[in-house]
Amino acid sequence: MRRLARLLVVLCGLAFAQVVAAVPAAAQSADVARKEFVIGIAQYPATFHPNIESMMAKAYLLGFTQRLVTVYDKDWELVCMLCTELPTIENGLAVIEKLPEGTDNGGAGENGIAVTYTIDPKAVWGDGTPITTDDVIFTWEVGRHPESGVVSGEGYRRILSIDAIDDKTFVVHQDRVDFTYNAMNDFRLLPAHIERAIFEGNPREYRNRTAYDTNPTDPGLWYGPYRVASVTAGAEIVLERNPNWWGAAPAFDRIRLVAIENTAALEANLLSGSIQMIAGELGLSLDQALAFEQRNGDDYKVIYKSALFYEHLEPNLDGPIVGDLRVRQALLHAIDRDAINRQLFAGKQTIALTNVNPLDWMYTADVVRYPYDPARAAALLDEAGWREGPDGWRANDAGERLAFTLMSTAGDRSRELVEQVLQNQWREVGIDVSIRNQPARVLFGETIPQRKFDGLALFAWLSAPESVPRTTMHSTMIPTEANNWQGQNSAGYSSERVDALIDAMEIELDREKRGEMWRELQRLYAEELPAIPLWFRSQAFIMPTWLGGLEPTGNQYPTSLWVETWSIAE
Amino acid sequence: MAVFLIRRLIDCTIVLVVMSFVVYALIGLMPGDPIDLMVTSDPTLSAADIARLKALYGLDRPLIDRYLAWAGDALQGKFGYSRLYVQPAAAIVSDRLGNTVLLMGLAFALAAAIALPAGAIAAQKSGRLADHVINLVAFAGISMPQFWLAILAIIVFAVLLGWLPAGGMGNGSIGDTLRHLALPVFTLAIASIGGLLRYTRGATREVLRQDFIRTARAKGLSESRVLWGHAMRNAMIPVVTILALDFGALFSGALITETMFSWLGMGKTIYDAIMGNDYNLALLGLLIATALVLLCNLLADLAYAWLDPRVRLR
């Protein structure tokens, strides 16, 4: 019996050694990929309709199959994609105009703006039907209809009217003038020749009957380098070249998007050659990617890009402890962010000074800094009335211990690791922090929106380049029972000066003046710490070594929007 | 027999009605609704958008009103649209149920084909080398986490050896589907062999000690005839209960295996529906799973009567 057990142990050991030393089937040859390139994604889109629901998996798919009117590129500059020239006040394609009498724009001033766009003359739907202003007007009608199911209707409602000058040129009349006047990033065109009859038949049922979900392989729905060829709901989407695509020809005949939600399985599929690339937008977390690179880095190309995921500690400012600025400053001084970044993330995260990413044009480093300094943290806590007792923990004069909870998403390994380090580093200065994590749907469905946390919550905000933090910092955006928990200012931060800056910068068209406002906002952020900044999360793109031309954007617009620039190295 | 069947079917219907309300209420009481979840992925959503979408999806109505509306439609065979897949919930469930039947059915058959005879042999050879080896395998199956086993199987058979695909559903041809089924079926079967084998071994050992077995041996029957012809049929009575419960539970899917191998089955569908607040899909999936558990238990009761003529169904 013992001999048998010994034999089994040896066999298991050998198998394990084989597994550890696994040589990846790795990046399949470029020739195979030229015919069919297989990309693994960790999420499957709920609907293919461009304007109903908002999720990254869908944005990634639409990147291959559609083109936005305008978009923020890899340099975070607004550029034309479907239009021929970006309209600006300077080039005369945007003109400020007086609003018609009685226009209700929520007090956003008396002026509106008329912005003229021209659609690329060569642009056609996948069935050869030209893309025209009729499609633009139909998309607007669907977007502003209260029962269409379009998620974010604000952008459509701000449009007072659209004038069709001809088949390709149209003028959008907006009910206010703000610096994003020429951005039509979220205005995703719908094919009027297919969708109009479905929509007008029953607008309330449109979201269930749209051809995007009932007949997604209809070529007339798509207008990118690829169109949808076949769909296995929940599993994979096969894309084929769009013969009516008017731009540069993409490198691959077909692209297969395979949804594998478990990231360990995603990695194993890559190693087995079942997939050839893991999309950075929807793939491995940074720590997983780093571990993967360490094991298999020679066989794959791994690119890291700092993204607009602002990882931070949101305080509940109504709480007696973290509501005190000196305590928040002490907390930040007591965190060694550089060491955490180095040890846990191989230095790939971008340390945040405020909520503005260093890649954003209005970023400034000229703000109050909080270097790792436990002595300074201790002094600040003393000043705030939290003195260290004989047991090492701090307490106030009433004998209450300096203790609060730290919450985050349960099951997120990176965040759980960070929480443990934070707990230890704060313990060094006498702060007693208990970790209480919740599933994402509880944390984001109730705890944070309804401000049911007494200390800090560790999570991230995703934003766009030059995103004005109205929803997260303006005092009118504090969720309360009275406003039915609307708004994302869960910290409860309120500052008249910051409110005034946010209101002013939204309507300031002069980039230099706006830049100055942004710099003041960042200075205030660093001084008042409405949230404790940690870092901007990086995305990891794992691809075959022969793939070129893929340039991560770091913003919410996925790399697939530029698929025609992806190339195969000979 | 007919009275028994009618009574059990009425019981099943009552259980299903109660379950439908309990499940609806539990999902409804979970924090956050679909629109709250949308807000977390799109902070630009305005208060007006949120109110409009809640009204559109009927989420501004009391839970009981929503349940009654759903139940009224369900009685007419309308189970509504899946919010996650934007397709009729019934269509999604029927597809996934087929996949689950295939995966679980094969895994169950493989597990039963190995566990039942192995358990019987272990009982017969109790305390000997064969018993120890079989027990070792059984305990390995019971104690090995499915997640780990799945990853190991993928790495060995897909990455190292390249014999089998790492996951997915295949292109629909029989050969390719079987290739894609191999690893998940193996993983699931290994996980259920252990328990089933131990139950069979225990039940068979118990039966082998009984008087009628001694009588059978005294009559000069061979050991294999005693085991397979007399002991096994009697040993099956407690095992059938376990089989029925296992088989019913199989239809609610195996979340971990389906997730690891990207197999589109009921387990993952129900899980995603609950987490995504897809009421229609979650309800239908859970009700079908419940109905199948009830049906399997009914079949188990019928099997008792067949296995043991002393059992009378009334």
Image (cartoon, helix red, strand yellow):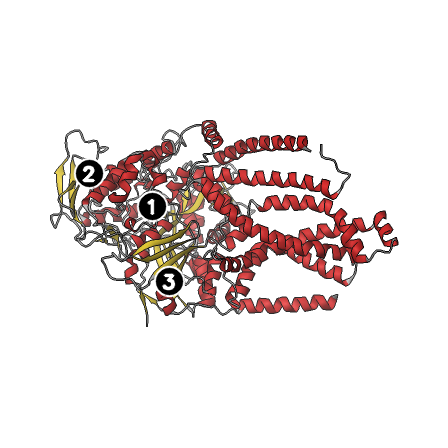
Amino acid under label 3? Phe
Mark 1 belongs to which subunit?
A
Residue corresponding to mark 1: A212
**Disc 1 and disc 3: Cα gap in Å?**
23 Å
User: Mark 3 Cα within 10 Å, few/some/many (few <14, many 20+)?
Assistant: many
Residue, x 55% and y 52% (percent of image)? Answer: B103
Report helix, strand or loop for mark 1.
helix
What x and y, as percent, mark residue A75?
26, 57
Q: Is residue A124 in view from this perspective?
A: yes
Amino acid type of the residue tagged 2 in the rendering: Arg
- State the image coordinates of residue A56 (x, y, percent, origin top left): 37, 50
Secondary structure, mark 2, is loop
Relative placement, left or right, of A471 versus A269 is: left
Mark 1 or mark 2, which has the lower sequence index?
2
Mark 1 burial class by Cα count in 10 Å: few <14, some 14-19, many 20+: many
- The mark found on residue A176 in the picture is 2
The amino acid type of the residue labelled 1 equals Tyr
